[in-house]
Amino acid sequence: MPLLKITTNQPIDQDRLDQLLKHASESVAAVLGKPERYVMVSIEHNPQMLFAGSRDALAYLELKSIGLPDDQTRQISNALCQLMERQLSISPDRVYIEFSAAERHQWGWNSSTF
């Protein structure tokens, strides 16, 4: 049920992309306390992007989940920014993260909803 979408202006080769997907999936499962079997990660890389008037390395992340804990978004932001810094060398001050909570009845899976 958690979905992490990563958009970054950085080019990523296939080996690095595979590692980023793996680490992102593990990180989301860990920070949300959800089984990784439900975590989905999507990455769009190398689009034309500008932040603060600069094309320097940047990332925009969207994290959507059922039961997203409002009181933990600061810790989740820290974990995701660290992930971007470790995996893509993107400074945390060049990362925006949008958090979105979904109601169970508004999240479909396996021909039904949660």
Image (tube, rainbow, N blue to C red):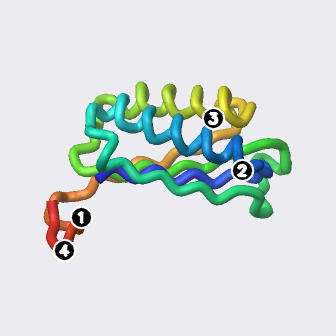
| Res. 14 mark | 2
Give the image location of residue 51, x and y in percent: 75, 49
Vertical position of residue 106 compared to residue 5: above or below: below
User: Disc 1 designates what residue?
Assistant: 107
Q: Is residue 60 left or right of residue 91?
A: left
- Separation (CA) of disc 2 from disc 1: 30 Å
Kindly indicate the quadrant of the structure image that contains residue 43: bottom right
Disc 2 secondary structure class:
helix
The amino acid at mark 4 is Ser
Give the image location of residue 80, x and y in percent: 52, 34
Q: Nearer the viewer, mark 4 or mark 3?
A: 4
Vertical position of residue 13 compared to residue 27: above or below: below
Q: How many labels does the image show?
A: 4
Q: In this view, does 25 lie to the left or right of 6?
A: left
Disc 4 secondary structure class:
loop
The answer to whether the residue labelled 2 contacts the one labelled 1, judged by CB atoms less than 8 Å apart, is: no
Q: Earlier in the sequence, mark 4 or mark 3?
A: 3
Disc 1 crowd rating (10 Å Cα; few below 14, some 14-19, many 20+) is some
Q: Which of marks 3 and 1 is nearer the N terminus?
A: 3
What residue lies at 27% left-to-right and 31% top-to-bottom? 33
Q: Nearer the viewer, mark 2 or mark 4?
A: 2
Q: In this view, does 27 lie to the left or right of 109?
A: right
| Res. 111 mark | 4
The amino acid at mark 3 is Met
What residue lies at 36% left-to-right and 48% top-to-bottom? 39
Q: Which of marks 2 and 4 is nearer the N terminus?
A: 2
User: Disc 3 designates what residue?
Assistant: 84
